[in-house]
Image (cartoon, rainbow, N blue to C red):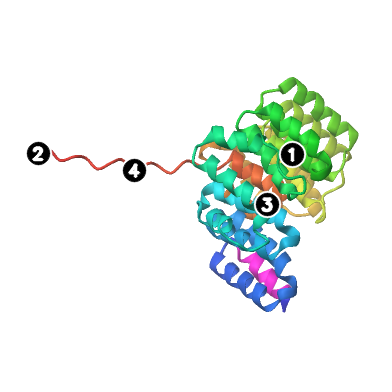
């Protein structure tokens, strides 16, 4: 039974990841009509617990198989590869002669330049015109990479050109991140308020919270959180992700008064003590440099954009570099 198998796969993803993966794999084989949605659920489970190597392998295969959602899967592949999955899946897709892999060749070649530290060549490749009919994620990738290389103007110009292709939600998410990366705080504050005032709805709150996790700002956080908790919908299963996004944005800003207010409203609406929220607050109270988002993500029903932001903000300590063996005296 698909529903039972999926429930088991999701419930075991934290306590028994081996069992969870076995069920997800079995569901993809025995229920091919639901393969694409199963793969997305599996990807979110792997991402949440930090299994980036397996998540990258799944994304690499799905780029070619699930062409209807190729933009989703290409972003997944890039995100996981940058978080420790390595080059294997990227290189495999770049060498794949399948027709579904060809539209991604230029993006993959540019990513290879970035990963090799050839920044000047990568920037030139990103700034050159790309095919107008390229997949939508191609333009997302261009703008994000240009901003990461310090070319704020180039990123903003590209976003202005490709807004219709990207859609408003993606456009504004990238736009705010580019302003923050470029240190344009005054313009960021003005445009943040304009976005909040123009369309106060769940998608807008979600994208603003993802931005505030990645770029904490106590003043902007207060404007979003206070308005949402005062006038937004009461917590239920449908909007749980946005409520938890507000908690994460407040925690990232170190605003634990608002963390507790949001948590209390969640607990009252759900009529439960929600012990996981206490663990989430404890997580944000610790040093960001020592925290790894994967310790709380499996228990957080947050949207994917907020998941990526948490992984960026809380990657955990870098693995220590092994010292070279001491040379023996002659």
Q: CA distance from mark 3 to mark 2?
A: 58 Å
Report how far apart the C-alphas of labels 2 and 4 lie in the structure. 24 Å
User: Comparing marks 2 and 4, which lies closer to the viewer?
Assistant: 2
10 Å crowding of disc 3: few (<14), some (14-19), many (20+): some
Q: Answer whether residue 159 is visible to the viewer in this image.
A: yes
| In the displayed structure image, the side of residue 166 where residue 309 appears, left or right | left
- The residue depicted at 43 percent of the width and 44 percent of the height is 319
Provide the residue span drawn in magenta: 3-13
- Residue sitting nearer the eye, 300 or 216: 216
Q: Nearer the viewer, residue 293 or 146?
A: 146
Residue bearing the label numbered 3: 300
Per the rendering, the mark at residue 330 is: 2
Q: Earlier in the sequence, mark 2 or mark 1?
A: 1
Residue 190: image x %, image y %?
81, 24
Secondary element at image label 3? loop
Please say if 69 is above or below 266.
below
Look at mark 1 in the image and give the residue it sits on: 209
Farthest residue toward the top?
186
Would you say the residues marked 3 and 2 are in contact, meaning their CB atoms lie under 8 Å apart?
A: no
> Within the image, what quadrant is residue 13 found in?
bottom right
- Name the residue carrying label 4: 322
In space, the residues marked 2 and 1 are separated at their CA atoms by 61 Å
């Amino acid at each position: 039974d698909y529903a039972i198998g999926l429930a088991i796969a999701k419930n075991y993803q934290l306590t028994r990841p081996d069992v969870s993966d076995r069920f997800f794999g079995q569901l993809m084989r025995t229920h091919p009509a639901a393969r694409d949605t199963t793969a997305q659920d599996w990807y979110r489970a792997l991402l949440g617990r930090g299994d980036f190597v397996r998540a990258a392998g799944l994304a690499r295969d799905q780029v070619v198989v699930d062409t209807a959602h190729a933009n989703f899967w290409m972003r997944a592949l890039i995100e996981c590869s940058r978080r420790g999955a390595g080059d294997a899946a990227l290189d495999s897709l770049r060498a794949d002669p399948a027709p579904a892999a060809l539209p991604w060749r230029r993006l993959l070649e540019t990513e290879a330049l970035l990963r090799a530290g050839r920044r000047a060549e990568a920037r030139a490749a990103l700034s050159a015109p790309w095919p107008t009919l390229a997949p939508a994620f191609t333009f997302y990738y261009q703008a994000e990479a240009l901003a990461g290389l310090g070319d704020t103007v180039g990123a903003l110009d590209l976003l202005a050109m490709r807004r219709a292709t990207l859609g408003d939600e993606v456009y504004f998410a990238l736009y705010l991140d580019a302003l923050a990366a470029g240190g344009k705080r005054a313009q960021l504050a003005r445009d943040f308020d304009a976005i909040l005032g123009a369309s106060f709805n769940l998608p807008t709150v979600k994208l603003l919270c993802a931005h505030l996790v990645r770029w904490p700002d106590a003043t902007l956080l207060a404007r979003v959180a206070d308005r949402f908790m005062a006038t937004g919908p009461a917590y239920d299963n449908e909007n749980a992700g946005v409520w938890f996004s507000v908690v994460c944005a407040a925690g990232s800003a170190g605003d634990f008064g608002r963390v507790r207010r949001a948590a209390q409203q969640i607990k009252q609406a759900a009529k439960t003590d929600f012990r996981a929220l206490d663990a989430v607050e404890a997580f944000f109270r610790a040093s960001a440099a020592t925290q790894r988002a994967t310790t709380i993500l499996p228990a957080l029903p947050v949207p994917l954009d907020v998941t990526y932001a948490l992984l960026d903000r809380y990657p955990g300590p870098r693995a220590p570099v092994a010292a070279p063996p001491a040379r023996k005296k002659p």
